[in-house]
Image: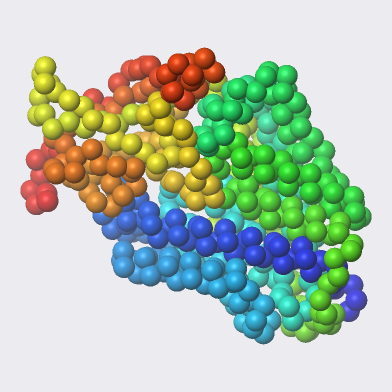
């Protein structure tokens, strides 16, 4: 069936699949390295406690059937190994059915993690990875030319990611409409990168150009994805450039890299001089049936996300069913004007006095020491650092886990301390821990030259009063 496959998509599929596998690898590595303190058996939001109250049908996961920290670690590391193999081309070295099984296994394995991850996995890029990963199951491998239907579903996903983000901005914060949002965003975004200070210090007119270009990329270019090549390809290429701009200006885990993979799958079609390798045009009947069924399923499930795009009260980053198959996306419908950070400190003193010394806990990604330049971590996801940003916006965001975090600092819990940049109490845990809310802003050029500090901060108010461990039988 000539209509079913098209070898002209081979490069787009290749780039898309390799980038997607690398994102999977990053996601599994982050899960393996962080889970014990976050959702482990003794974590802040333990999986066993979650699955005891949430039924399988609401959160399908292998960990509903069995959980232990050792099993979760093995599951995550096996996912990382499989993703690394796929990124290296293993799925193209096996028969079509085996390749589909490999992509399906990655999807099932990561779905199992997301569905028990609770608050720590409540980010839009988790659903985006799962939806993108499901499409990859039906893209085939080197045994046949790419199926056209699935490549168009990739465009539909890219359209919803970008157009949804553009609409929610225009419907949300006024600063997107008067083109001033990026006067604040680089400074107040959840996790600035090493270039964010310089982006923030761009002249005001350039910030307006940035904002206008964002509207073009998210509201204008996505419509062109449904036009013939090379127009669709060049529109996707321009969208890819905007994603790289976001990569350089901040840390948004793998959101930009997944969107980049989607965009490049379309942009590659604008390169007619790239000669495809010899690929069989005919697809097995069973594969054709599966792809057609999957396409019909995606279109049916797209009703609610499509309606959401047209809704006045648009929702962003929403999954409509527990498999995260077709979702709604969006980002930064509102932009904070002032950056606030929760600073956590401990002391070895049991009571306050003239000699009381409070030592600050340093995080890897979120601002702390004013003289430390923000680092680049994306596409790696520092989940605790991101949730600390939300906690600074409102204590309600920290209600379920912050107390457990403080308790583990007081216990000197090794898994929790591994999430931090250092332990100011290497010999014994602190006797008390407190948290204070600070207002942060980037320094000016003059302040940077004079002090060498990238940030200026001032205390706003206490966030958590000095807290000690309460006596409890059997506490270790």
Q: How is the image coloured?
A: rainbow
Q: Nearer the viewer, residue 352 or 166?
A: 352
Q: Quadrant of residue 280?
A: bottom right
Q: Quadrant of residue 77?
A: bottom left
Q: Is residue 133 visible in this depiction of the protein?
A: no
Q: Nearer the viewer, residue 435 or 276?
A: 276
Above or below, 107 relative to 458: below
Whole-percent x, y for residue 143 in the image = 74, 81
Above or below, 101 relative to 378: below
Whole-percent x, y for residue 265 in the image = 75, 59
Left-right relation of 311 to 368: right
Q: Residue at x 11, y 49 (%)?
A: 475
Left-right relation of 70 to 474: right
Above or below, 433 relative to 8: above
Whole-percent x, y for residue 237 in the image = 79, 49
Q: Residue at x 74, y 55 (%)?
A: 264
Whole-percent x, y for residue 300 in the image = 73, 59
The quadrant of the image that shows the N terminus is: bottom right
């Amino acid at each position: 069936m000539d209509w079913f496959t098209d070898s002209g998509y081979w490069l787009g599929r290749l780039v898309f699949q390799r980038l997607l596998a690398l994102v999977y690898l990053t996601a599994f590595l982050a899960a393996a390295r962080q889970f014990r303190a976050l959702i482990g058996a003794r974590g802040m939001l333990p999986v066993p406690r979650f699955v005891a109250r949430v039924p399988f049908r609401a959160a399908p996961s292998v960990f509903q059937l069995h959980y232990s920290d050792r099993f979760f670690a093995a599951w995550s590391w096996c996912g990382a190994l499989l993703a690394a193999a796929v990124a290296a081309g293993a799925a193209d070295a096996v028969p079509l059915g085996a390749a589909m099984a490999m992509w399906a296994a990655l999807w099932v394995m990561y779905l199992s993690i997301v569905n028990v991850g609770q608050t720590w996995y409540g980010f839009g890029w988790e659903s985006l990875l799962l939806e993108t990963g499901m499409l990859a199951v039906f893209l085939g491998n080197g045994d046949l030319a790419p199926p056209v239907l699935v490549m168009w579903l990739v465009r539909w996903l890219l359209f919803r990611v970008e157009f949804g983000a553009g609409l929610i901005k225009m419907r949300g914060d006024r600063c997107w409409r008067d083109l001033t949002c990026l006067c604040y965003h680089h400074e107040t975004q959840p996790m600035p990168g090493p270039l964010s200070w310089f982006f923030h210090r761009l002249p005001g007119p350039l910030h307006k150009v940035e904002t206008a270009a964002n509207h073009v990329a998210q509201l204008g270019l996505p419509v062109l994805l449904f036009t013939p090549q090379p127009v669709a390809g060049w529109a996707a290429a321009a969208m890819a450039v905007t994603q790289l701009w976001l990569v350089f200006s901040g840390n948004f885990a793998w959101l930009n890299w997944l969107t980049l993979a989607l965009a490049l799958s379309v942009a590659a079609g604008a390169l007619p001089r790239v000669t495809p390798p010899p690929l069989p045009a005919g697809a097995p009947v069973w594969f054709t049936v599966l792809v057609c069924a999957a396409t019909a399923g995606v279109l049916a499930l797209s009703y609610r996300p499509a309606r959401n795009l047209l809704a006045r009260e648009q929702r962003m980053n929403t999954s409509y069913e527990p498999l995260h198959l077709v979702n709604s996306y969006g980002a930064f419908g509102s932009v904070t004007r002032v950056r606030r950070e929760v600073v956590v400190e401990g002391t070895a003193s049991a009571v306050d006095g003239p000699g009381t010394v409070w030592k600050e806990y340093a995080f890897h990604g979120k601002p702390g020491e004013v003289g430390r330049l923000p680092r680049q971590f994306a596409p790696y996801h520092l989940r605790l650092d991101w949730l600390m940003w939300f906690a600074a916006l409102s204590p309600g965001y920290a209600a379920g886990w912050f107390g457990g975090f403080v308790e583990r600092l007081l216990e000197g819990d090794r898994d929790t301390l591994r999430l931090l940049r250092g332990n100011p109490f290497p010999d014994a845990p602190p006797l008390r821990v407190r948290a204070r809310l600070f207002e942060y802003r980037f320094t000016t050029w003059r302040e940077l030259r004079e002090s060498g500090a990238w940030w200026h901060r001032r205390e706003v108010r206490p966030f958590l009063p000095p807290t000690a461990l309460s006596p409890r039988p059997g506490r270790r």
